[in-house]
Image (cartoon, rainbow, N blue to C red):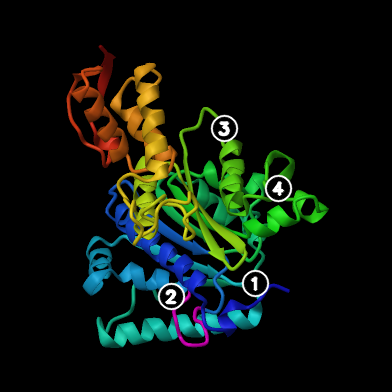
Amino acid sequence: MAKDINKDKFPEETKLKLEIFAECFREWFPVFLHNQYIKKVYIYDFFAGSGKDVEGSLGSPLILLNEAKGENRKYCNQIRKNNKRVYFAFNEKIKIKQEQLQENVKNFILTCQTANCQTNCIYSYTNFAHSEFKDFLQNENFLNILRNKDYGKFILLDQYGFSQVDKDIFLQLVNAPKTDFIFFISSSFISRFREHPATKQYLDTAKINFDEKQPKECHRLIAQYYRDIIPTEKEYYLHHFTIKKGANYWGLIFGTNHSLGMEKFLKVCWSKDKLSGESNCNINNDYEQGMLFHNTEETIKKEEISKVIRSKILKSEISDNISGLKYALKNGCSSELFTAVVKQLEKENKIARVGELNYSSSNIHKIKQYNIKIL
């Protein structure tokens, strides 16, 4: 049986994971809340736990509810004013933990309500379940929500292992409109038991080239495995974050259909890891803080991706700003990296920009396109 993390104090690695969940949702929620074309917003936590650890630190469901209030309850007030519908659904398959979760959520909402609005909480209609995750994927009501282009969906899958998100489920999430998801996966376990039938049942590990001499690469490789599943014609964004605990490596994988979603997630990741934006363990062996050549502006990852972008521009493989900005995002870097390369090539008189000129790097979906001419 999987360890019940709610019975103990959350370790630092779990706290980091929860921080990323919180900050990811903090970036995501207002985008969908303020989108006039989104009629309803659904937030799902399918492996919710009991809501707290033994010391009372908030687990993912209470973190999501807390973030959904906003500073000084600004989101609560906006939802009341605009009459927008926001729904939370928390699933915990272990009945006793699900009951604890219900009680913790009830107390959380009551405390907030008493201290603040004194009226019925807009999130008091939270739904609870204690089912297997895969049962939801057979539920027609959930599937209708997942398929609906007018609904914004945030799906959190904090699974204990790796068996819940196989190829079919992954593609189901990838193909769902207006849906962002983040899931946790036990990367070291997959690497260690890659030949075991129980592992191969869920992942085609023959397609993952694990290197026992490079254990910290295992989550990168698993993320690439999922990336390779995405249909080549589909514009989609996937990024990962490796969390080292002792000799083991866990991982988060985030997926979104929209460049803005990836901009937001990368912002969170690079705030946690200023060297590569993807780990808590200096995955590229950069110079660390306190060392003579430490420089977060010129890290191994940034230098490598910059060189590739430069080469692709000069070979006309990247011929406009939009494709270049998206290329940086898809390789786990801020789109500002592309703009920096363009400025340098212009300084060297190797390229000229043609069209609606700008050096914008954020909100790619709103940027005017220009073309790149090789001189």
Viewer-nearest of labels 1 and 3? 3
Q: Residues within 10 Å of mark 4 (few under 14, many from 20)?
A: many
The numbered mark, 1 or 2, whose residue comes first in the sequence reads: 2
Task: Read off the residue under disc 1.
Answer: 93
Q: Secondary structure at mark 2?
A: helix
Mark 4 vs mark 1, CA separation in Å: 23 Å
Residue position for label 4: 203
Task: Measure the C-alpha gap from mark 1 to mark 3.
Answer: 32 Å
Quadrant of the rendering where the C terminus is positioned: top left
Residue at 59% in and 36% down: 228
Tag 1 and tag 3, C-beta contact below 8 Å: no
Looking at the magenta stretch, what is its main secondary structure? loop
For the residue marked with disc 1, what is the amino acid? Lys
320 w.r.t. 54: above or below: above
What residue is shown with label 2?
62
In primary-sequence order, the first of circles 2 and 4 is 2
- What range is drawn magenta here? 51-59
Mark 1 vs mark 3: which is more N-terminal?
Answer: 1
